Image (spheres, rainbow, N blue to C red):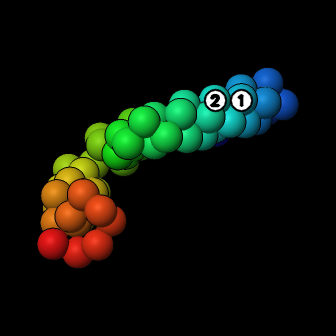
Amino acid sequence: MPATRREFWEAKFARTIARDAEQAAALEALSWRVVILWECDIRRPQVLQELLAELFSESPDGGAA
């Protein structure tokens, strides 16, 4: 979170999270599988590798492959 204009950024992040949740719900209602990757996570190779390994080790129905 940026140190300046904290109220602005908190509101902006809250709106983004709410919008993403609405969009994910709409896509899931159409049988899409939604995965959210945060920029701060994908910048770290080890974290990205772990996220992708977890994602691709699961079966489409949500259970372990």
Could you classify mark 1 by the number of other residues whose Cα lies within 10 Å: few (under 14), some (14-19), or many (20 or more)? few
Residue 2 higher or lower than 55, as above or below: above
The answer to which image quadrant residue 21 occupies is top right
Considering the numbered disc 1 on the image, is that residue within a helix, a strand or a loop?
helix
Residue extending furthest toward the bottom: 64
The residue nearer to you, when weighing 45 against 29, is: 29
The answer to which image quadrant residue 39 occupies is top left
The answer to which image quadrant residue 62 occupies is bottom left
Residue 32 higher or lower than 59, as above or below: above
Q: Which residue is mark 1?
A: 15
Please tell me which residue is depicted at 55% across the width and 40% down the height of the picture. Answer: 25
Spatial separation of the CA atoms under disc 2 and disc 1: 6 Å
Please tell me which residue is depicted at 42% across the width and 36% down the height of the picture. Answer: 30
Residue extending furthest toward the right: 7
Q: Of the residues shown, which amino acid type is indicated by label 1?
A: Arg
Left or right position of 65 against 30: left
Where is residue 11 drawn, in percent x and y? Answer: 78, 30
Residue 59 higher or lower than 41, as above or below: below
Considering the numbered disc 2 on the image, is that residue within a helix, a strand or a loop?
helix
Q: Which residue is mark 2?
A: 19
Where is residue 20 drawn, in percent x and y? Answer: 57, 34
Quadrant for the N terminus in the image: top right
Left or right position of 29 against 12: left
The residue nearer to you, when weighing 4 against 36, is: 36
Please tell me which residue is depicted at 38% across the width and 42% down the height of the picture. Answer: 31
Is residue 24 in view?
no
Quadrant for the C terminus in the image: bottom left
Q: Of the residues shown, which amino acid type is indicated by label 2?
A: Arg
Looking at the image, do the residues carrying marks 2 and 1 touch, with CB atoms under 8 Å apart? yes
Residue extending furthest toward the front: 30
